[in-house]
Amino acid sequence: VTFLKRWLLEDEKITVLLDKVAEDMGTLEITRGRQALELRSNLSERRALTDPIRPPGQDESSARNLQWAKAHVLPESRHLRFDCGVTVQLGFAAEFSNIMIIYTRVVATPGDIAKCEAKLTDIPEELDVDLKCTNKESPEEVGSPLAPAWSLGCPSSCLYSRLCGLQKLRQELAFTVCLQYRYRGMDDFVEERRTVSVGKPLIAKLNL
């Protein structure tokens, strides 16, 4: 790189430029006989590092932008009402176009229920989901390096789950929201389940 920097702005064919770099490397004791530059090329026409960048055509650019936009569409947040009267908010955030965060939050609880929480289960096996990164009480616990960014739009007091590898989805994404709750004066928890389908989120829409 030290030698290449001297020639980066020269309007020379790339193979000619690299020949000059090789010659320079042979002039210094530190590289002479110790490091050689091997050149192979199958260029059929002249190409230089100073060649102007040619932007894509308008139609190609528009199609690419449309694909990009489709790969960043999240499912809409929704509310699930269970038979016991509990209402759970189901929301979504994107870490990348192939990594989605799903969060659940209890937003309404009848007075006779002392405690409840809603967890995600039955996530498709084709996705890369670490069970250690599901149903966590804080964004940081799901193992996301970008948690401070995507969690800004999430409400508080949620359970978070991280789903990776959305490009592997062949069918619509379906999972189960499992509500566990306990009535006042009782020790045992009761469980209700609701299957949810959210279509093909983010990059899964492109059917790669």
Image (tube, helix red, strand yellow):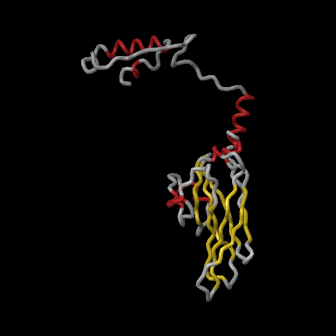
Please give the count of numbered marks on the rendered protein: 0
The structure residue drawn at horizontal position 65% and vertical position 71%, both measured from the top left corner, is 179
Q: Is residue 135 above or below residue 198?
A: below
- x, y percent for residue 12: 49, 12
Q: Nearer the viewer, residue 44 or 156?
A: 44
Q: Nearer the viewer, residue 5 or 35?
A: 35
Q: Is residue 203 above or below residue 24?
A: below
The structure residue drawn at horizontal position 73% and vertical position 33%, both measured from the top left corner, is 63
The extreme left residue here reads 29
- x, y percent for residue 129: 56, 54
Q: Quadrant of residue 167?
A: top right
Q: Quadrant of residue 4?
A: top left
- x, y percent for residue 61: 70, 31
- x, y percent for residue 39: 43, 15
Q: Nearer the viewer, residue 127 or 106?
A: 127
**The C terminus lies in quadrant:** top right
The extreme bottom residue here reads 185
In-image side of 76 versus 123 (left or right): right
The structure residue drawn at horizontal position 66% and vertical position 61%, both measured from the top left corner, is 91
Q: Quadrant of residue 176?
A: bottom right
The structure residue drawn at horizontal position 71% and vertical position 44%, both measured from the top left corner, is 205
**The N terminus lies in quadrant:** top left
